[in-house]
Amino acid sequence: MKQQLLNTLKPFGQEHLLTFWDDLTAAEQKTLAGQIESIDFGRIAGLYSRRNEPAESLSVAGCANDPPGYKFSTVTDPSPVRMPKPITAAEAVQAGENALQNGKAACCLVAGGQGTRLGFPHPKGMFPIGPLSKATLFQFHFEKVKALSQRYHYSVPYCIMTSPATHRETVDFLRNPPDGAKPYFGLAEEDVFIFCQGTMPAVSLENGKVLLESKGSIALSPDGHGGMLAAMAKGTAESPSVLATLRQRGIEYLFYNQVDNPLVRIGSPEFLGYHLLSGSELTSQVIRKKNPAERVGNIIEASGKLYVIEYSDLPESVAKQTLADGSLKIWAGSIAVHVFSIHLLERSAKNADLLPFHIAKKKVPFIETATGHLIKPDKENAIKFERFMFDLLPLAVNAAVVEVDAANHYAPLKNAPGNADSPETVRRDISAMHRSWLNRAGAVTAADAVAEISPLFADSPEMLAGKIQKGETFGTAVLLR
Ligand code: UTP
């Protein structure tokens, strides 16, 4: 077997992966051989050799325009959005409601990331984020999908993407959630589709050699949230792909969100309605940038296509441009909440090389083959390759954005306590949003009351309004479940 593996590795200068082969147990050899066989070393060599080539989006950064889009009804900022055709919020809600009443939408949660910045020793979805209940991120998301199913009277399929880094623990957690909660927080098992994304090896920044994380295994990491496209389309002889299953169930639209944002309005009819009425295949939520240099992915339009351009790649002169009313021209910061038309995913999945790989320079611990020692680098030593779902934007017909306000839609859990986008800031934002829903419904709360409303009690201010008496008074901690 060793010789066969050497034959695979030699043309690409990767024979060092077998340095410790003879010291490995039979089981370790089997694991390493499996990893080597699953890697496309030709692709890795090509990606490494093109590592300094600019991404397609960079080539259009100089001529970036504001993207076509719509304003969500909760947005109060009056700055203009370039609407491709006039659609009112009421029309959008009506169109979205019709599609939901006809059972046309499913939801997808990407939860394969390693969550390194948060430093939590479990999948991020297991993080207890509820300000009062300590409900996990997973619970918030699952209860929103359950509420959606109840409101529209159909079993909304819920697709959960994991990675080898998060799969086992996520499956165990969802089957047996804590505190006596029902499996899958009350969703039926046959409506939950858990699928695992692929991996890519980390390579040395210096010479493109694939890194070993131990003597018998390669340093592999999830292949980015864009790995969803291939993973959803992958079926086996025994079971059809998730994408094929959605199609069989008559699904035409997929709400997508990331695990770290508990404010997301999963299944918003208004958001879906803009997607439908604008004839878009991919519609993305954005928040308005407060200043030109804000550290967000910018959604821009160039030559009739939409792209995401990282803040670091946007020329300062372009970032500072303004529209006639003085507002920023490049105003749309992506928050990674999308609606995909299923046919866009089906069409795109046919081409395995459609989504480009982005490179990220990272510190990756590795085994030094000369000594067998584990090296923990103090500066970036490796390249990781990742794909992103937003790279479907330029390929989608009539792609559009919908401006939403962060207060009602976006509070990402990214960092450890003491930083921005950390447990304290996310809990504060959940509480502020729910307090504002209560006040809007006519309830009286202390200005600093901590509020938390389970999605099963009410998952929108409109729904809450039907359950609260005007003038109803609450104390300093309000938990509605
Ligand atoms: P981030 O880019 O914030 O990464 O992921 P992360 O893994 O959560 O955190 P860091 O960067 O290691 O600190 C955004 C979303 O995309 C998912 C994450 O689970 C999160 O929902 N994701 C990311 C995947 O599903 N797969 C990936 O390969 C990467």
Image: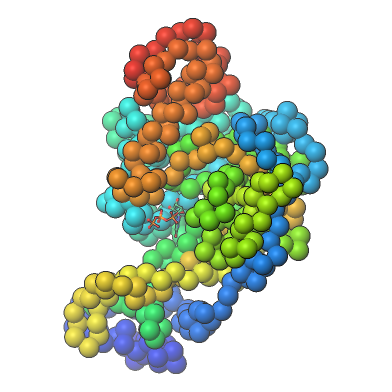
Where residue 255 sits: x, y (%)? 59, 44
* Residue visible at 58% across and 63% down in the picture: 316
Where residue 121 sits: x, y (%)? 27, 51
Report which quarter residue 303 is drawn in: bottom right
Tell which residue pokes out farthest to the right in this image: 85
| 281 with respect to 17 (left or right) | right
* Residue visible at 43% across and 32% down in the picture: 430
353 and 387: which is toward the camera: 387
| 291 with respect to 282 (left or right) | left
476 and 328: which is toward the camera: 328
Q: Quadrant of ligand 1?
A: bottom left
Report if residue 218 is visible in the image.
Answer: no
| 234 with respect to 383 (left or right) | right
The quadrant of the picture occupied by the N terminus is: bottom left
Where residue 181 sits: x, y (%)? 34, 30
* Residue visible at 48% across and 81% down in the picture: 48
The quadrant of the picture occupied by the C terminus is: top left
Report if residue 459 is visible in the image.
Answer: yes
Where residue 95 sits: x, y (%)? 73, 33
Report which quarter residue 233 is drawn in: bottom right
| 315 with respect to 435 (left or right) | right
342 and 240: which is toward the camera: 342
* Residue visible at 76% across and 60% down in the picture: 304
The number of numbered badges drawn on the structure is 0
